[in-house]
């Protein structure tokens, strides 16, 4: 036995949750791009995974870390405000896995990040199944097609959702008015992805082919626009900057997304350590498919295919990796 | 593993003394405002702290004082850009922020009874000085101690008096070289890496601890290897752009390593496997 939520009950259910929580749903932003927006009764975009991932909710493009208050020659450090507890609805399997990778980095690895923890620990996640494979996705190859790390997961059925329970916190999301008991079973993950990537020993194969010719040829097309790193659900690099407040009451510290595709990312003492496009494109692909796996035993790529989707010159890390496997040093 | 639970939040520290070392380098004696923190603050030479100059930002700076000095911490800062120049404008009594200590330092305790060759260039002597002070404080633990240091000119020689003192007291064998000699300079001239072949060094039972500009590190490692040193006898501190110090911002990533947490001190055998020059 499990639970079922009828399609016509979805909006009322989200509205109910919204009374106590800040609810985020897949919807269009002011530019018409799909992303996670605060629920306001707007039309939901549930047909395909969003262009922007859930990353943006936990690691916003720009956020304030601290505020340093200056008074009578002394200084006080204020941490940034607490957040309302959150519920994020409609997170696809690939993005659930992306959150898991970010959790490793921002909650476990060498101490936690208070800003990330603040938002992450007060939020519940409701996953949503995919009925069609994405145009540029390869989640089945990465093993991220199987949902995990959720509180509830909604498997889409003909006239509603079968609700799978994933964590002890699920009861906070349960409401008997909307959930009915059912004999239905959960669905099956997407297996027929349009792209395929052989990940067997991939991290070693790429490492051994650090000087493969493809880095040269592909990077000749790359524009260093950094769209790929911006859209990636696991790209998390940031730059920290201080500002003075106009009224001179103190200063504040911001952090902002940074991209390894830009020269300034590695600039020290007048030297740029990754000065060429070749080295920067290689850094992106290697971090996704080799380095992180070597460090944390999980790939930093979840196969969502967003980088391939947005790249203006159609550079594909799947093509690069497959070509290296085909022709490179074993 | 880590001293702070939430490692991004700086702690306030007061500047208690400022000393000009060279036209562009100053040493700051700083002390945590929180007395308990100051007492607890323990570090290995080679580790670094993230220094906040409020309103300007945060930068990684090695601790240049001895780990046995409990009253204050010394930071030796070269004015090269925005934050470091802002730091140079600070005076006694001003407050800065500190996080750390971060990274892996020189594991002196592993080098019991070994000869140590300290090797530095420019401001790299800051972190090496901490290690030298620690080694000299426990001199009986080690064999012969050597110090090679290079800088652009005699005006820019960091800790010159201190080096002379160490030499006079026969604490160590020092060898300082300047790239471009000025009038009255009696020491060596030329790149510090040129001294490696000239100065007779015991290879057996010796370790090399190194910190300096990337070119110096690269050439020095090669020359020590040519002399017969094995990569695992050499340790070098690497420099990368750093915005967090705790393995999150990504700037210091080289291959599978994050220099801020897996380094900055790496062994020669680790360095051989790293993609130091990516082009
Ligand atoms: C582990 C570690 C220990 C260090 N210890 C010391 C020390 O003891 N004393 C000292 O004077 N300096 C040290 N540095 C270098 C110091 O961090 C930089 O000089 C400083 O960040 C420059 O900041 P800025 O705002 O003044 O310069 P910016 O205005 O940011 O830039 C000025 C110039 O310095 C370069 N730069 C910026 N950040 C770094 C960096 N992290 N490493 C190297 N170059 C950089 C810039 O590319 C630019 O060319 C250390 C660096 C690392 C990584
Ligand atoms: S999106 Fe494409 S062109 Fe832009 S930086 Fe990434 S790989 Fe290069
Ligand atoms: S300094 Fe941020 S990851 Fe190393």
Image (cartoon, rainbow, N blue to C red):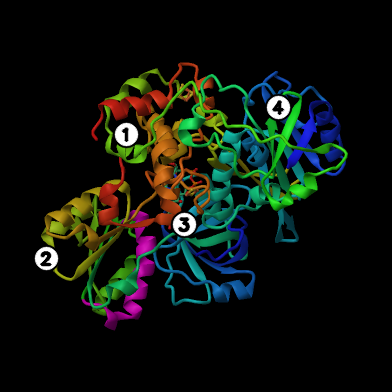
Observer-nearest of A176 and A110: A176
Question: Dot 3, crowdedness within 10 Å: few (<14), some or many (≥20)?
Answer: many
> In which chain is the residue bearing label 4?
A
SS label for mark 2: loop
3D distance between C-alphas at marks 4 and 3? 58 Å
3D distance between C-alphas at marks 4 and 2? 79 Å
Q: Nearer the viewer, mark 4 or mark 2?
A: 4
3D distance between C-alphas at marks 3 and 1? 26 Å
Note whether ligand 2 is within 8 Å of mark 4. no
Note whether ligand 2 is within 8 Å of mark 1. no
Label ID, residue B200: 2
Residue B126 among those drawn in magenta = yes
Q: Nearer the viewer, mark 3 or mark 1?
A: 1
Q: Main secondary structure of the magenta part?
A: helix
Note whether ligand 1 is within 8 Å of mark 3. yes
Observer-nearest of B15 and A280: A280
Answer yes or no: is residue B234 visible: yes
Residue indicated by mark 1: B279
Observer-nearest of B50 and A109: A109
Q: Position of residue A272 (x, y in %)?
A: 39, 36
Observer-nearest of A241 and A146: A146
SS label for mark 4: loop
- Whether residue B45 is situated above or below residue A43 in the rendered picture: below
Residue indicated by mark 4: A157
Residue B200, picture quadrant: bottom left
Q: Position of residue B111 (x, y in %)?
A: 28, 72
For the point 35% across and 37% down, which residue is it?
A202
For the point 81% across and 38% down, which residue is it?
A179
Label ID, residue B61: 3
SS label for mark 3: strand
């Amino acid at each position: 036995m499990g639970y079922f939520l009828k399609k016509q009950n979805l909006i009322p259910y989200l509205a109910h949750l919204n009374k106590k929580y800040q609810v985020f749903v897949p919807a269009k932003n002011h530019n018409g791009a799909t992303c996670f927006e605060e629920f306001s009764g707007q039309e939901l975009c549930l047909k395909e995974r969003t262009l922007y991932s859930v990353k943006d909710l936990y690691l916003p493009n720009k956020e304030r870390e601290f505020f340093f208050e200056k008074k009578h020659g002394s200084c006080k450090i204020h941490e940034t405000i607490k957040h309302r507890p959150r519920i994020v609805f409609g997170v696809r399997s690939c993005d659930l896995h992306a959150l898991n990778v970010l959790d490793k980095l921002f909650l476990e690895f060498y101490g936690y990040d208070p800003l990330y923890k603040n938002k992450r620990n007060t939020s519940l996640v409701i996953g949503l199944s995919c009925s069609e494979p994405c145009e540029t996705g390869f989640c089945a190859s990465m093993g991220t097609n199987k949902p995990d790390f959720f509180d509830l997961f909604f498997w889409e059925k003909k006239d509603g959702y079968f609700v799978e329970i994933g964590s002890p916190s699920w009861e906070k999301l349960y409401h008997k008015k909307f959930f009915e008991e059912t004999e239905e079973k959960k669905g099956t993950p997407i297996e027929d992805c349009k792209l395929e990537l052989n990940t067997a020993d991939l991290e070693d194969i790429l490492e051994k082919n650090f000087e493969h010719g493809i880095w040269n040829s592909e990077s000749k097309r790359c524009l260093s626009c950094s769209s790929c790193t911006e859209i990636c659900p696991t790209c998390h690099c940031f730059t920290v900057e201080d500002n003075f407040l106009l009224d001179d009451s103190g200063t504040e510290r911001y952090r902002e997304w940074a991209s390894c595709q830009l020269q300034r990312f590695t600039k020290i003492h007048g030297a740029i350590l990754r000065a060429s496009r070749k080295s920067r494109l290689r850094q992106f692909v290697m971090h996704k498919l080799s380095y992180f796996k070597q460090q944390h035993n999980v790939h930093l790529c979840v196969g969502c295919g967003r980088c391939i989707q947005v790249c203006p010159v159609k550079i594909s890390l799947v093509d690069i990796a497959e070509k290296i496997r085909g022709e490179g040093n074993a | 593993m880590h001293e702070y639970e939430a490692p991004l939040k700086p702690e306030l520290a007061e500047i208690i003394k400022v000393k000009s070392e060279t036209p562009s380098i100053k040493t700051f004696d700083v002390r945590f405002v929180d007395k308990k923190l100051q007492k607890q603050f323990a570090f290995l030479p080679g580790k670094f702290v993230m220094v906040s100059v409020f309103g300007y930002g945060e930068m990684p700076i090695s601790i240049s004082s001895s780990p046995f000095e409990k009253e204050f911490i010394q930071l030796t800062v070269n004015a090269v850009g925005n934050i470091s120049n802002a730091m140079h404008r600070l005076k006694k009594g001003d407050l800065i922020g500190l996080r750390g200590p971060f990274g892996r330092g020189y594991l002196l305790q592993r080098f019991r009874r070994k000869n140590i060759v300290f090797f530095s260039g420019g401001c790299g002597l800051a972190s090496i000085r901490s290690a030298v002070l620690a080694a000299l404080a426990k001199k009986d633990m080690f064999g012969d101690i050597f110090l090679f240091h290079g800088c652009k000119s005699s005006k820019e020689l960091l800790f010159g008096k201190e080096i002379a003192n160490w030499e006079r007291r026969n604490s160590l064998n020092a060898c300082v070289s300047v790239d471009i000699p000025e009038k009255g300079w009696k020491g060596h001239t030329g790149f510090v890496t040129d001294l490696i072949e000239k100065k007779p060094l015991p290879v057996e039972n010796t370790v090399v601890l190194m910190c300096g500009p990337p070119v110096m590190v690269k050439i020095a490692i090669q020359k020590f290897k040519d002399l017969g040193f094995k990569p695992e006898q050499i340790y070098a501190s690497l420099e990368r752009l750093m915005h967090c110090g705790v393995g999150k911002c990504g700037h210091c990533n080289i291959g599978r390593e994050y220099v801020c947490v897996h380094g900055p001190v790496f062994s020669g055998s680790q360095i051989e496997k790293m993609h130091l020059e990516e082009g």
